[in-house]
Image (tube, helix red, strand yellow):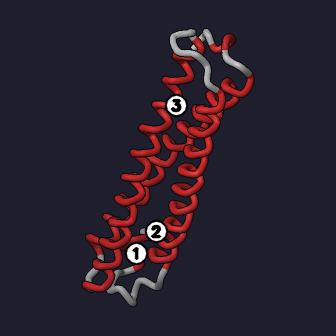
Amino acid sequence: METTNSLSSRALQYYVIARKWGSDLEFYKFETGFLRTLLDDYYFNIQHKDGRADVLELNRELMKLDADKNQLEKALDEQIRHLELMSEDVVPEDVSWLAGKQIRLEYMVTNIFSEYKELKKKIFSFLQKPHSQNGLATNMLFPN
């Protein structure tokens, strides 16, 4: 975007923050894909029903976070589009509206990433449990 010079410093700051959050969400997508792969591999190698049920529950929690992530992405895209339209003088700059929207976005970002951090801890903790409890040979999950 080349025309951001017409934005106020506050609106430009909101634009930069929204783009950074978008970048963070891109990383989130790669990381959750990796976690899903780990859980899938674990699921197909596990022999006990309890362990499989735990994997399914962790996957459900990831899906819920994905739904929240999709809402956040939509809201971020909307914010960025609005800021771009403001920079092109298509719509007037309304810093108070932007501030309210930015606060809601910040709440959403903080919430999703704190929930994700806790879920990631749960997943890693689950995958690090002694594998003999779950009927999984250690060499199947962590080959030499």
Q: Position of residue 35 (x, y in %)?
A: 43, 59
Which is in the foreground here, disc 3 or disc 1?
3
Indicate the amino acid at tag 3. Answer: Gln
**In percent of the image, x 52 and y 63: which residue is there?**
115
**In percent of the image, x 52 and y 16: which residue is there?**
85
Q: Quadrant of residue 47?
A: bottom left
User: Tag 1, which secondary structure?
Assistant: helix
Label 3 Cα crowd, 10 Å radius (few <14 / some 14-19 / many 20+): many
Q: Which mark is residue 144?
A: 2
Indicate the amino acid at tag 2. Answer: Asn
- The reply to whether dot 3 and dot 2 touch (C-beta < 8 Å) is no
Q: CA distance from mark 3 to mark 2?
A: 48 Å
Name the residue nearer the viewer: 50 or 13.
Answer: 13
Residue carrying label 1: 139
**In percent of the image, x 34 and y 73: which residue is there?**
57
User: Tag 3, which secondary structure?
Assistant: helix
- The reply to whether dot 2 and dot 1 touch (C-beta < 8 Å) is yes
Q: CA distance from mark 2 to mark 1?
A: 7 Å
User: Tag 2, which secondary structure?
Assistant: loop
